[in-house]
Each structure stands twice: as structure tokens, then as C-alpha cells.
Image: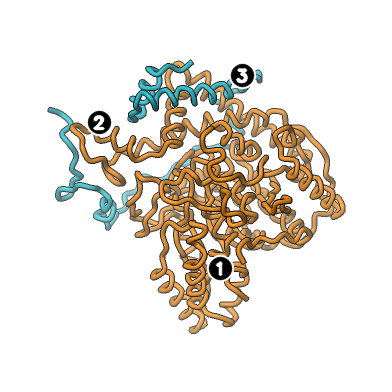
Chain colours: A orange, B cyan
Amino acid sequence: MEIQAMTAFEIKKGIEEGKFTSEEIVKMLFERIKEVDPKVEAYITLCEEEAIKSAKIVDEKVKKGEKLGKFAGVPIAIKDNICTDGVKTTCASKILEDFIPPYDATVIKKLKEEDAIIIGKVNMDEFAMGSSTENSAFLKTKNPWDLQRVPGGSSGGSAAVVAAGIAPVSLGSDTGGSIRQPAAFCGVVGLKPTYGVVSRFGLVAFASSLDQIGPFGKTVEDCAMLLEVIAGEDKMDSTSVKEKYDTDYLSVLDGSVKGLKIGVPKEFFGKGLNEEIKASMESVMEKLREMGAEVEETSMPITEEGLSSYYIISSAEASSNLDRYDGIRYGYRAKDYESVDELMEKTRTEGFGKEVKRRIMLGTYALCSGYYDAYYNRAQKLRKEIKREFEETFEKYDLILSPTSPVLPFLSGEKSENPMEMYLADIYTVNINLAGVPAISLPCGFSKDGLPIGLQIIGPHFGEKKILKAAYALEQELKVDTLAIK
Amino acid sequence: MISIDDVKYIAKLAKLKFTDEEAEKMSKDFEGILEHFKSIDKFDLSAVDLNKYKDGLESVIRKDEVEVYEDKGKLFQNAKTKRETYVEVPKIIE
């Protein structure tokens, strides 16, 4: 089988069984990257030498019959806002263009402990702000299904490498839909865990109360496999959850949705939803009924204003988190300045892109005295209500179903002039981050022009197992192609 | 209505600088976005208490124990101008 079609699960099994070596896999992958990445432009940094070294270590372990990690020999691409010791981490921003972290993020540490092979760092919207990956300071990543279109964002690179077969799995981050929306645009599987399940230590912060790291894969099984490695309490992240919850996600993939009660909020099917996406969702709902699930319409009225709450809170938190980029201790530093103030002002003005500056300004405004109550406070109250609405809905239903995106993957440049239009693309994903619940985007078909369509399955807090179980069952039924470039 | 002066004031707080043209564009962008935000006034949120939490929520704390960090040099590997163990910056006080 060719490397682009292989799943992480298959690669691990094959290495364990001696069918091939990790070195062979890694070398095949880099061959393919050299051939395909120039078209897709997803990789900011490649770690070929390090990867082959790590692969050889895994192969030695296999030869000696030593215990292998859960991800032994499997290559993985990492979104460039996750710190990798000794490997440039730019957040796709000029202000971090030469930043080399002195430490590994916890998720990287965990992956290395399980013998995973870090292949490289992939493109994204600058500081995770965006829904198209067009806000990157370095590369213009293309959607592998249609190179004229965007891969979605902000984890556009992470989604694109999986869809293009130049990484079997990848890690992304999701603050307002940044894993799920690019997963839908690129026709792959992407999951945002419950807030607190995956450590944020080493994830460059955008909005600390919303950010989560999560897996991308061609299959639900690969996402479950990756989630098992990265989930868990971390003393370095005080927002990582300490309660005991099961992380044996692979155990629930048995293909059944019988008896499952699924709610479909009518607010997620309003005007603005593309007709083809609507039709695809309706056919999936029928399929679920045939499979033995109860699917019925419900209502979640407060979620209609989630977008405003999200943009106020995330911009406010971002304006605070991005305060640290001042050219003093790391990153880009402006050239001509007289005072420290001028150094910082010039550095930030020259180093940040347009969208980042826009959000910092919005956030600063919302937190200004005089406006704090009108905007930030109100947004937080609305958020509390949204969380309550989700909890109440999950008392009646096991899962919630919706489209992931109201629009099909758009053309490069189509939405980049009007910020509000770009923000509206997140309308079905932001509420999930506000409430802290988990959700997956699963490919469910294609438009008549061959563009991927993704559906979203939302679960209660710590309901990843429920989500993965249902997603796996649907995936086996729908059998959607997830490899764009053969 | 966000005036260009408002934009420049906020920019000062955020340590950013805009030209008059950029400030004008930003004020227009803001208007569109803030217009959309008015929708959060739709709901009656007077009963929502942000200081009320679910039972059992505890602050996360840890023991204040000293651990020696060996590789201090590594921490400053990205500073642009160093002098011995210091990060060099322009004069702060005259």
C-alpha cells in the first residue's frame, strides 16, 4: 500500500508486525512531501534528519523486542503554534519568525514518550486568528480538493497535510472552530476535546479559556488513537482536568448507534446555510434513523448570539495574551528606535499581521474602562447561559448534530476583505468552545462540484467516547473518500 | 461611532501604531463588527451571576517548592541583544 493511503493505525501495526520499518515509512513520506507539498504549501518547517534518527531508534526497539509506545514509528505533523524544543515555532507570524522554543509542549513530550515521529510544523492563520489560513505571514496553503480554494482555518495546514496524504495524522488547535472547520473544508476527521482534557502547556495562547489541542486523521480510529496519547491531566496546565475520566477511546469503536437520541437544533439550519450542505445533512439524518438512532429537531435559541459573545471574549483574551510580544526576550525586534516604548510599538506594528492587530484592538476596546460592562461582562454572562443551554439539551439527548460550516470551501481571496463575513463562517462552531463541550467534524459527502462537506457531532462534557462511537458507526456506513491527492 | 482619535487612543494602549488611513479603515471595520455585537443586548441577562459556581469547584494550587532549572542559557537563546547574563535594551530612565 502507498504511504498516502495508510492510516496511523495501519502504520503502527505494520511496524509492530515487522512488515516494514519506521525508517522506510518516514523516507517514503518525505519523498512524497517533496513531490506534493510544493502544490499544497502546508509545511513551514520539515524535520527530516531528526525524524529519520527517531525512526531508527524505533526500529532498534523493534529488533530488540523492547516495549513499543502507542504511536511507535508513526509520523505526525504539528501545527506551528505548538512548541517543539529546538525546532522553529512561528505561529505563522513575522513576530516569531525565528523563535526556537527551549522546551517541548506537553503533547509533544507525550508523543515522543509513545515513540511518535515528528515530521514537521505546518501552516496556520497567524496566532490562530482566522478561518482560511490566508492570514499566514509565510505560506498560502491550498485546499487539496481544489487548489484554488482555501483549506479553512486556522489549522488549515494540519487539515491539508492529512487530506493530501503528506502526513497520516496531525495536531491542530481549536479556539472557535479551528480544527473542525478546516476538517470539514478538507474532507478529513477533526476533533476538539472537552476543555481541560488536553494540556495547553506549550500551546501558544490565543484565548486561554477557549483553546484546545486536538487530532486530525483520515479516519475516526486514527483520531481516537491520537487522542488517547495526548489526553490527560498535566500539572503544568492548571486548567487541565483532574477528575478521573476514561481515555480508552479506541475501545468504543464498535459501529452501533442503536437507541441513541440525537437532537438537531433548528437554529443551526437557518438562512445562510448552503443548500447542498443542508441536503447532505438531511440525508445523513435519514441514514442515522435507518441505523436505529432517534433523530429529532430541538431548539437552542441562545446559541444564535454565540458569535458576538465569542468574538468579544476571544479578542479580549487575545489582546492580553499577545501583550508579551514586545521584541525584548524573543522574536522579531524592530531596527530603528530611540526608546523602549518605541522599540515595543514598532516591533508590534511591524511584526503583527492585519487580522491580529484588528483583534488586539477589538479586545483592548472591549476591556477599556467604560466598555468592560457593556461588552466583556455581558459576553461572559451570555456564555454562561450558552453553557447552561447545552447542559440542559444534553439532559434530553445523547448527542447534538449540526453542519460544521454554513458554507462550502471558498476561493482564495473571496472573504479576506470583509472581516465580518469571515467571522460568520464560524457560526456553528464557536458555541461549542464557549460551553467547553467536545465536538467532531466528520466528512459526510461532497457538493456537486466535488467540494467536501462536513457534519458536526457535539457531545456533553467528557463525552468524547459517545461522540467517537457514533462518528465511527456513521463513517463505516457513509464510506466517504478522505484522500484528495492520490 | 468610533472616531479616528478613539482608534489612536486604543492603539496607544495596545502599543500599536496606525497611519491616518489605517485608522480610518479600522474605525469602519469596528463599526461593522460592533453593530453585530449589539445583538447580545437581545437577552435579559440580569439574573446571571458570574460569581456563582457549581458545588465542588476548588482553586488549583500546588506546593511552592524550589526546583533548580539547569539550562538557564537555553531560556535566553532567542534574545536579540545580550550582555553576559543580561538582555540588553535601550535606556529606560534618563
Where residue B34 appears, as percent x and y from the top left, is 53, 22
Question: Residue A348, how many percent across, how many down?
Answer: 33, 36
- Does residue A216 appear in the picture of this structure? yes
Find numbered disc 3 in the image and state the secondary structure of the residue it sits on.
helix
State whether residue A12 appears in this view: no
Q: Is residue A316 left or right of residue A49?
A: right
Q: What percent of the width, then of the height, locates residue A315?
A: 48, 32
Q: CA distance from mark 3 to mark 2?
A: 38 Å
Question: Both on one chain, marks 3 and 2?
Answer: no
| Mark 2 lies on residue | A341
Q: Is residue B34 above or below residue A170?
A: above
Viewer-side label of 1, 3: 3
**In the rendered structure, which amino acid carries the disc numbered 1?**
Lys
Along the horizontal axis of the image, is A477 left or right of A93?
right
On the rendered structure, is A190 left or right of A113? right
Give the mark nearer the N terminus: 2 vs 1: 1
Q: Which residue: 27% across, 57% down? A: B71
Rendered view: B4 above or below A145: above
Quadrant where the C terminus of chain A is found in the figure = bottom right
- The structure residue drawn at horizontal position 40% and vertical position 73%, both measured from the top left corner, is A53
Q: Identify the image quadrant of residue A15.
A: bottom right
Mark 2–mark 1 Cα distance, whole angstroms, equals 49 Å
Q: Amino acid at mark 2?
A: Asp
Disc 3 marks which residue?
B41
Which circle, 2 or 1, is nearer the viewer? Answer: 2
Q: How many angstroms separate mark 1 from mark 3 (CA)?
A: 50 Å
Q: Which image quarter: residue B19? A: top left
Residue located beneath label 1 in the image: A70
Q: Nearer the viewer, residue A78 or A415?
A: A415
